[in-house]
Image (cartoon, rainbow, N blue to C red):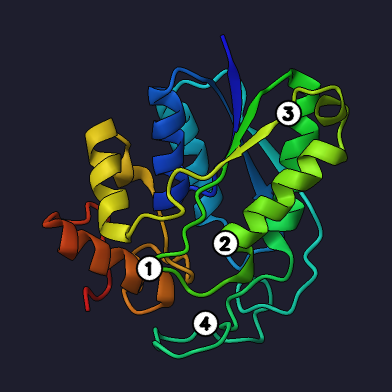
Amino acid sequence: MKKAIILLSGGLDSTTCMSVAHQEGYELYPISFNYGQRHQRELESAKAVASYYQVKEHRIFVIDSVGGSALTDLSISVPAYQQEAGIPVTYVPARNILFLSYALGYAEVIGAEAIFIGVSSIDYSGYPDCRPEFIEAFQHVAEVGTKAGVEGKPIAIKTPLIHLSKATTIKLAKANGAPLHLTTSCYQGGEKACGICDSCTLRLKGFKEAGLVDPIPYESRS
């Protein structure tokens, strides 16, 4: 069976990616990261999603935080959603570069032919490492910087959500039977999602536009 690495954060997008890879017939090898984030709830969600799909192996890599983000530095507050130009303080420097690098190495080791990552350039917070330009550049890295690539069997970086709105992503997840009730998207990581951070706001907006009710609990559904 063909194998795929899935970058699994435990959130809505990465879980939808997992459902897409499952539907495409891949043997699933999700990986998650403990990178010094302000809460561990997302890792618990990732474990629950991996268990739901009965994956052969779910690896959690521990890497040092480079700081500089509200998601990794408790002295920087997570702001409420503000639709403004610019890159927000929740941007984690080089996060997807680091994550994809680990995924690429792991893919070579187990002979995976694809890496799924749930980036989107629609209904997103403006992070530079979620744009098509970044994915194209990293695909080139995979082709010229790995044994698989130079031997003519490059590992494909798959981004099935990159041009989808959040509402369309949610509809895709529902069609695939993805366990969205196990996911978390909140930057705060409380027992209930805050409902006001960037991630919660975009998620709730997506469910509303999709005509569906988000199955996870919230402090506030703004």
Q: Secondary structure at mark 1?
A: loop
Q: Amino acid at mark 2?
A: Cys
Task: Point out the image quarter for the C terminus.
Answer: bottom left
Q: Secondary structure at mark 2?
A: helix
Q: Earlier in the sequence, mark 4 or mark 3?
A: 4
Cα–Cα span, label 4 and label 3: 34 Å
Q: Which image quarter: residue 133?
A: bottom right
Cα–Cα span, label 1 and label 2: 11 Å
Residue at (88, 27) in percent of width and height: 147
Q: Which residue is mark 3?
A: 107
Mark number for residue 130? 2
Residue at (56, 9) in percent of width and height: 1
Q: Is residue 81 above or below residue 205?
A: below
Q: Amino acid at mark 4?
A: Val
Does 150 sit left or right of 162 as displayed? right
Q: Which residue is mark 4?
A: 78
Q: Which residue is mark 1?
A: 123
Does the residue at mark 4 contact the one at mark 2 (Cβ under 8 Å)? no
Q: Secondary structure at mark 4?
A: loop
Mark number for residue 102? none
Q: Amino acid at mark 3?
A: Ala
